[in-house]
Amino acid sequence: DLRRGSPTFGQWEGFELTDENMHIAYCPIGFAHGFCVVSDTADVMYKQSGYYADETERGIAYNDPDVGIKWPLPVESLKPSHRDSTAPRLSEIAADLPFD
């Protein structure tokens, strides 16, 4: 939850999405999303409320201790992209987020 005024600001939830359970995740505006692929392959599809704009894309550190995401694999074994491995902590960008 990236909404600064929310009682759940900075908290997270995790869901297992598989081709067997056919579940999907809906992330409304004001929420971040991330994923960890634990299989050999994965298809990830996004439906967005607007066109993608690189200049407004942001990220937060996948290993931010203040958020404390419990990934399905040990954090030391994760292989994040360069973008994700250099993302700032939530506390470093919270004041600049457009969500109240």
Image: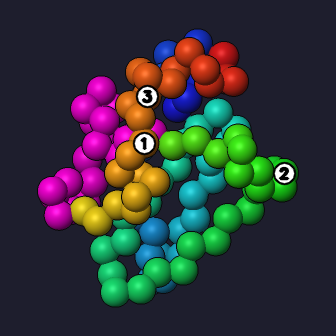
Position of 93 relative to 50 (above/below)? above
Q: Amino acid at mark 1?
A: Ala
**Residue 74 coordinates in the image, percent (x, y):** 16, 58
Task: Please give the label number shown on residue 64.
Answer: none
Secondary structure that dominates the magenta span: loop
Position of 15 relative to 87 (above/below)? below
Q: Is residue 83 left or right of residue 52?
A: left
In this view of the protein, which residue sits in the foreground, 33 or 63?
63
**Residue 61 coordinates in the image, percent (x, y):** 38, 41
- Does any portion of residue 15 appear in the rendered image? no
**Residue 11 coordinates in the image, percent (x, y):** 41, 30
In the picture of the structure, the residue carrying the numbered disc 2 is 50
Distance, label 1 to label 2, CA atoms, is: 23 Å
Q: Is residue 29 left or right of residue 85?
A: right
Q: Quadrant of residue 96?
A: top right
Q: Which residues are magenta?
A: 60-77
In this view of the protein, which residue sits in the foreground, 46 or 96?
96
Distance, label 3 to label 2, CA atoms, is: 24 Å
Task: Please give the label number shown on residue 90.
Answer: 3
Identify the residue shown where x is 62% and y is 24%.
97
